[in-house]
Image (spheres, rainbow, N blue to C red):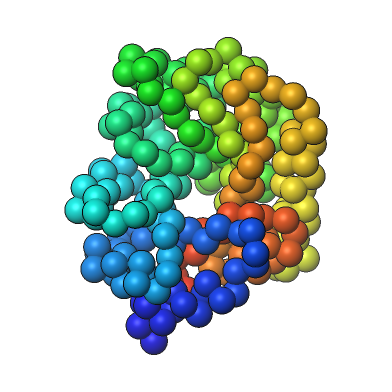
Amino acid sequence: MTVKENSIETLNTIKDGVTLIGVSKTKPVEMIKEAFDGGIRNFGENKVQDLIAKMDILKDYPIKWHFIGHLQKNKVKYLVDRECLIHSIDSVDLVREIEKKYGNKGRSCRGLIQINIGREESKFGVLKEDLYDIIEEVEKSEFIKIEGLMAILPKENEEILRKYFKDMKNTFDKLSKESFKNIDMKFLSMGMTNDYLYAMDEGSNMVRVGRKIFGER
């Protein structure tokens, strides 16, 4: 099947109210155009330089861009003038750097807090018990708007995955009921090619699918 056909097929599996992000990392612009022709409008990249390059080439396409990789503090400055949702805000230090760099330009940053729900040493993200440290820092800021949460889950069986997804949804719902400055729980970004169907069942409203659309890397 072509990328366009894969895109159409994948979109047909997406529940109402859920945003599908085509994870286009490492893929050429031609493939993104094919996926766009198949109906996908949101795309995610995990390297800042690749995101910027593709945004420039595809500037005439009405694409909503997402940065889904680990964001190093020294790369924040390159995103300030770009319209994208950052999925990977994962530390107090990163919040401070974003506030500084975006504040210098008077721009507002839209982001999600990444939680390391599986407590994996190999993955980035804040541990759940440290989440409020980031929230407190965001509340002090003027140029950051947190719009939800993101998680990358361990490779596990369905039962364990659903447990993690439920845990994330419970955290999302709990924060939704609280009142914070600069925080509005709109998006729960969880679920990838192998597990996005489970994620949607458990309340995800934003899924990040790569291989099912673009094929193996």
Q: Is residue 24 above or below residue 51?
A: below
Query: Going 47% across and 20% down the picture, which residue do you hit?
Result: 143
The residue sitting at the left extreme is 57
Pick the front one: 158 or 191? 191
The residue sitting at the bottom extreme is 1
Please indicate whether residue 124 sits to the left or right of residue 29 in the image. Answer: right
* One can see residue 154 in this view: no
Q: Is residue 73 above or below residue 170?
A: above
Residue 58: horizontal and vertical position, in percent? Answer: 24, 55
Query: Going 31% across and 65% down the picture, which residue do you hit?
Result: 32
User: What is the quadrant of residue 131 in the picture?
Assistant: top right
Pick the front one: 8 or 171? 8
Residue 158: horizontal and vertical position, in percent? Answer: 72, 68
* One can see residue 164 in this view: yes
Q: Is residue 99 above or below residue 13?
A: above
Please indicate whether residue 119 sits to the left or right of residue 144 in the image. Answer: right
Residue 118: horizontal and vertical position, in percent? Answer: 67, 48
Tell me the quarter of the image containing the N terminus: bottom left
User: What is the quadrant of residue 139 in the picture?
Assistant: top right
Please indicate whether residue 149 sits to the left or right of residue 94 in the image. Answer: right
Query: Going 73% across and 64% down the picture, which residue do you hit?
Result: 201
Residue 142: horizontal and vertical position, in percent? Answer: 50, 15
Q: Is residue 61 above or below residue 91?
A: below
Query: Going 46% across and 41% down the picture, which residue do you hit?
Result: 85
